[in-house]
Image (tube, coloured by chain):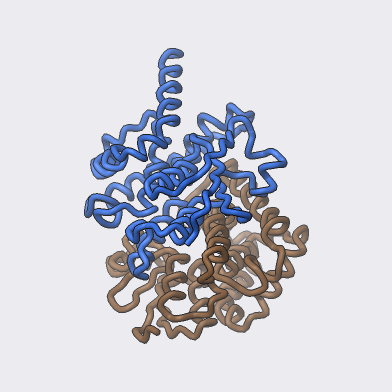
Chain colours: A blue, B brown
Amino acid sequence: MESTPVKLYVDDGSQPSRACMIFCEMNNIPYEKVETRILKAQHKTEEFKKINPLGQVPVLQDGEHYFRESHAILKYLHSTRNCPDHWYPSDAIKRARVDELLDWHHCFLRQGAGNTVFKTLFGPKIGMKFSEGEIEWHKTILSYSLHMLDSKFLGNHKFLLSDELTIADLSIFCELTSLGFLSMDFSEYPNIKTWYSAIDSIEEVSKVCKPVKKFIKMFNNQLKAKI
Amino acid sequence: MESTPVKLYVDDGSQPSRACMIFCEMNNIPYEKVETRLVKGDNRKEEFLKINPLGQVPAMKHGEFCLREGHAIMKYLHASFDCADHWYPACIKKRAKVDELLDWYHSVLRQGAAPVVFKTVFSKFFGMKFPEDEIKMHHKILKLSLKNIENIFLTDDFLAGPEICIADLTFYNEILQLKYVEYDLSKYPKLLAWCDRMAAIPEVQKITKVILSFIKAFLDKPKAKI
């Protein structure tokens, strides 16, 4: 069982970065947070690309090994740091259920939510241009994803699969937090609202999400001031 | 070792469906292929929605247990049928490297390759239309994906090392689908060499026979009729 502290190369604004930090906090995994700011293009430096040639956050450094992709990182930490079973159960059937949700998240919710927020708000700030058609596509997927989450995945238990958290809850929760930039409050999605509040009230979640929530508040206030 | 039979609800035209079938073939996992044709709307029928309420293929039924998502299915089968380690290694670090590839596939390659093919070729059959700039976006993602595979991922015979893993199956089937649009892969020599290695596997040939015949028929058709 590993006990060496890890380094997490993260951006507070990055949903998968927050999921990894929350997991470490909730499982008492000591980590060094290495700020890698996307808006300052720190993920594009030569130095960073040596540890992740894809130029993306989060990245985990464990000794001399580097891992990218948040779901891979969460699973790796779970296996190596003696974390409680409920996060990513060893039972093949229960584990497969978590895998279903993690994969769905990548193909749908992330494509909708992550892209809508980035392409409407942040991409243009760093000189990127996106077409109307492209953004409409992401909005369609976002709408579909929220509907599926509310009507198919949530409502049967306190969390997605049971009354205990899994890594899928963290991943999906963090994706939804970023929708605060679009001033989304989930009032149309009662199951999402209940589940979201339950996770939002967890101490470690509050701690990790504090910077992004502050940023969201500032951002929305600036928008209101302009109107 | 499990002995309950496995049912795979698949469409030969579906990339992850083929990956799951090849996995079963290469690991001698007996399975019943339940044809679930997307163009016939089989995935929208009540009977199928009980297996996968999201209405997508592939789906799997093993005894009473129903599962969706190609990667989840292959991982589950790997764990349940005592398959060779190289497919999804028990070593945590090696496994994490396969997970990196599987996750990237969903976020990037699948977002480029599949929509390029679907939105250019198949959307008409489903009565759908997509704006030009949306298709351009998918082409950009596809190009980036292929560059990443060529320049970053393929450092050995297969994606995660000298032996095949489940990521090779999903990546290969996604790239195979690009034959529908006669996508030019000549700029990616390592990728082409890896494709040849995959294509030489008998079980891959068996499972991809149908899709290759569809592609040939499609490309041979006079364009005006499409």
Image position, residue A66 (x, y; %): 60, 53
A64 or B68: which is nearer to us? A64
Residue A99 lies in what quarter of the image? bottom left
The quarter of the picture where the C terminus of chain B appears is bottom right
* Relative to A21, residue B4 above or below: below
Residue A225 lies in what quarter of the image? top left
Relative horizontal placement of residue B45, taking residue B100 as reference (left or right) = left
Q: Residue at horizontal 40%, vertical 62%?
A: B56
Q: Residue at horizontal 52%, vertical 35%?
A: A118
Image position, residue A169 (x, y; %): 35, 49
* Relative to B63, residue A150 above or below: above
Q: Residue furthest front?
A: A3
> Is any part of residue B205 visible from this angle?
yes
* Relative to B200, residue B74 above or below: above
Q: Residue at horizontal 64%, vertical 80%?
A: B201
**How many callouts does the rendering have?**
0
Image position, residue B59 (x, y; %): 39, 69
Q: Residue at horizontal 70%, vertical 53%?
A: B147
B8 or A96: which is nearer to us? A96
B25 or B117: which is nearer to us? B25
Residue B66 lies in what quarter of the image? bottom left
Image position, residue A82 (x, y; %): 41, 59
> Is any part of residue A141 visible from this angle?
no
The quarter of the picture where the N terminus of chain B appears is bottom left
Relative horizontal placement of residue A104, taking residue A118 as reference (left or right) = left
Relative horizontal placement of residue B193, taking residue B138 as reference (left or right) = right
